[in-house]
Image (cartoon, grey):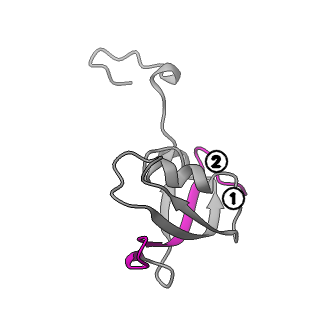
Amino acid sequence: MIVEDNMMVALRYSIKNSSGGVITDIMNDRPFRYLCGSGGILPALENNIRAMNSGDQKSFVLEKAENPGLFEDLYIDVIIDEVYAPAPEYIPISASNSSCSGEDGCC
């Protein structure tokens, strides 16, 4: 499956600074899981892994000049371990899809 909105993604990553210092490294740990498109990771990171598939690996740089809030360039290695459809209760419901009619604002 492909990394896209409303898909669960399990990934491992390593982030280093421009000097090669390790900021964080979970390559040998359990994968981090999140719902793509939910805001669970940096948007710039998410944009770089969109369209990847389970088993894909990628290296890229998040440049501070292109990403407000970064203090330095970040060098990222990522492995996509798994991409899968989440259980329905994990998919966000937008207000436009809501058919709520209860008195207290609850369905």
Asked where in the image residue 82 lies, by quadrant, the reply is bottom right
Q: Secondary structure at mark 2?
A: loop
Q: Which residues are magenta?
A: 1-24
Is residue 66 inside the magenta stretch? Answer: no
Quadrant holding the C terminus = top left
Name the side, left or right, on which 106 lies relative to 86.
left
Q: Residue 33: in sight, yes or no?
A: yes
Decide which of 47, 89 is in the foreground and name it.
47
Label 1 amino acid?
A: Met
Residue 3 x %, y %: 65, 54
Residue occupying image coordinates x 42% and y 19%: 100
Residue 41 x %, y %: 44, 54
Residue occupying image coordinates x 52% and y 23%: 97
Q: Earlier in the sequence, mark 2 or mark 1?
A: 2
Which residue, given by chain and number where applicable, does mark 2 sit on? Answer: 4
**Residue count near mark 2 (Cα–Cα under 10 Å), binned few <14, some 14–19, many ≥20:** some
Which residue, given by chain and number where applicable, does mark 1 sit on? Answer: 52
Decide which of 36, 96 is in the foreground and name it.
36
Q: Does residue 83 sit above or below 67 in this rendering?
A: below
Q: Secondary structure at mark 1?
A: loop
Label 2 amino acid?
A: Glu
Decide which of 83, 74 is in the foreground and name it.
74
Residue 28 x %, y %: 49, 85
Residue 29 x %, y %: 46, 82
Q: Nearer the viewer's eye, disc 2 or disc 1?
A: 1
Asked where in the image residue 15 lies, by quadrant, the reply is bottom left
